[in-house]
Amino acid sequence: MLYEEHAGPLLMFVLRLTGGDRQRAEDIVQETLLRAWRNAHRLGAQGQQSLRPWLVTVARRIAIDDHRSVSARPPETYDRELESFPSTADDTDRVLQLMTVTDALRTLSQSHREILVETYFRGKTVPEAAEVLGLPLGTAKSRVYYALRALRTALQQRGVTE
């Protein structure tokens, strides 16, 4: 009975508040009538006074609250799924590390740089590197040790702590 009597005029009123958005208007009318039904015991259940002023006030407040909540948050984009974005690997960290290590290697002496290139970048053992570079094994071992210390210092100067 409440719906039959008040839904039509209330919908026309709310349509003006929502700028003609019928779906939002219908939702607001539904919420308004649901609140009236839940509060029927307080609203003069004997029917002596008209409910329409109360319904219009509640509908207007719901419309205002809806408008404020929509404008208070960023707009939602329902039609853009995350899976549709191309997934590309970000090599920025790797490139920055490579640049930092290359720069630090340039500060080392020629002999230190050669032994590190052979042992770490070309994957040779210390005896193999010694043979390639024409060094005695003991000299190659000590160069690796001191070259790594010099490289660590150079990297620390560039902000690399580990």
Image (cartoon, rainbow, N blue to C red):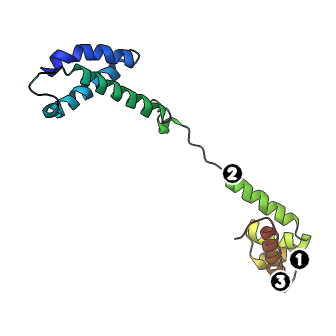
Q: Could you tell me residue 48's position as x and y percent?
A: 12, 21
Q: Gap between marks 1 and 2, in whole Å?
A: 38 Å
Residue nearest the viewer, comparing 48 with 75: 48
Q: Amino acid at mark 2?
A: Thr
Q: Which residue is the extreme one toward the left?
A: 46
Left or right for 62, reference 87: left
**Where is residue 128 drawn, in percent x and y?**
78, 76
Residue 74 is left or right of residue 14, and the answer is: right
- Of helix, strand and loop, which one carries label 1? loop
Disc 2 to disc 3, C-alpha distance: 34 Å
Report crowding for label 1: few under 14, some 14 to 19, many 20 or more residues within 10 A (C-alpha): few
Say what amino acid the circle numbered 3 marks. Ser
Residue 51: name its quadrant. Answer: top left
**CA–CA distance in space, label 3 to label 1:** 14 Å
For the point 50% across and 35% down, which residue is it? 74
Residue linked to disc 3 = 142
Mark with earlier residue (3, 1): 1
Q: Look at the image and tell me whether residue 122 can be seen.
A: no
131 to 9, vertically: above or below:
below
SS state under label 3: helix
* Residue at image mark 2: 92
Q: How packed is label 2: few (under 14 Cα within 10 Å), some, or many (20 or more)? A: few
Q: Which residue is mark 1?
A: 134
Q: Nearer the viewer, residue 142 or 123?
A: 142
Residue 160 against residue 147 in the figure, above or below: above
Residues tagged 1 and 2 counted as in contact (Cβ below 8 A): no
Q: Which quadrant would residue 16 be assigned to in this image?
A: top left
Report if residue 25 is visible in the image.
yes
